[in-house]
Structure formats: structure tokens, C-alpha cells
Image: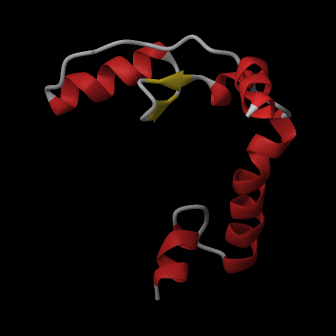
Amino acid sequence: MERDLLLTQFSAKKKAAAKQYEYFFKAPIRQGHRGDFYELKDQRFLGHDTFVEGVYRRSNEELSFFYNISIDEIVSEVHQL
């Protein structure tokens, strides 16, 4: 079963694996709000510049352009519609 295969990546013991999986899954929540998750790159990629550049390198595409628009600016524009 896929679930069992996933849990074995955390521990050989089911209860320990389930607890470790839960801890792993909830880790981003413990970090709080992260503004970097709201950075748009070429409207297709979400992440740091180095991540985006790596995606482009692997896909053999050229970087076209980057938008440096804050979430506040987007919300403001949407409210004006």
C-alpha cells in the first residue's frame, strides 16, 4: 500500500512513522507566514530566484522577464476592477 511505503520513509515503526510524518507535514505551519511564497516569477514559478533559474536551466528555456509586484499591489489592482 502506498501509505505504508510513505510511512517507512520516516520510521520502521508505524506509530513513530505516523508521528514523524505529522511533524514533517506541519513544519511549514510552524514557520508562520512566508512572504517568499508570494513572489511570482514569469507567472509560472513560485520560489526564490535560484530555484526559478534552475527550473529554466533544466527545461532549456531562456529567462524571459521577472515581475516584482507585491501582493498588496495585486490586491489593490483587483479591488479597482
Residue closer to the observer: 22 or 34: 34
Q: Is residue 32 above or below residue 67?
A: below
Residue occupying the point 75% across, 42% down: 28
Q: Is residue 23 above or below residue 70?
A: below
Does residue 73 appear left or right of residue 44 in this picture? right
Residue 27 drawn at (x, y percent): 76, 45
Q: Quadrant of residue 20?
A: bottom right
Does residue 80 appear left or right of residue 74 in this picture? right
Q: Is residue 29 above or below residue 54?
A: below
Q: Quadrant of residue 25?
A: bottom right
Residue 80 drawn at (x, y percent): 78, 28
Residue occupying the point 36% across, 12% down: 65
Q: Is residue 17 above or below residue 72?
A: below
Residue sticking out furthest to the front? 81
Residue occupying the point 52% across, 70% down: 6
Residue sticking out furthest to the left? 60
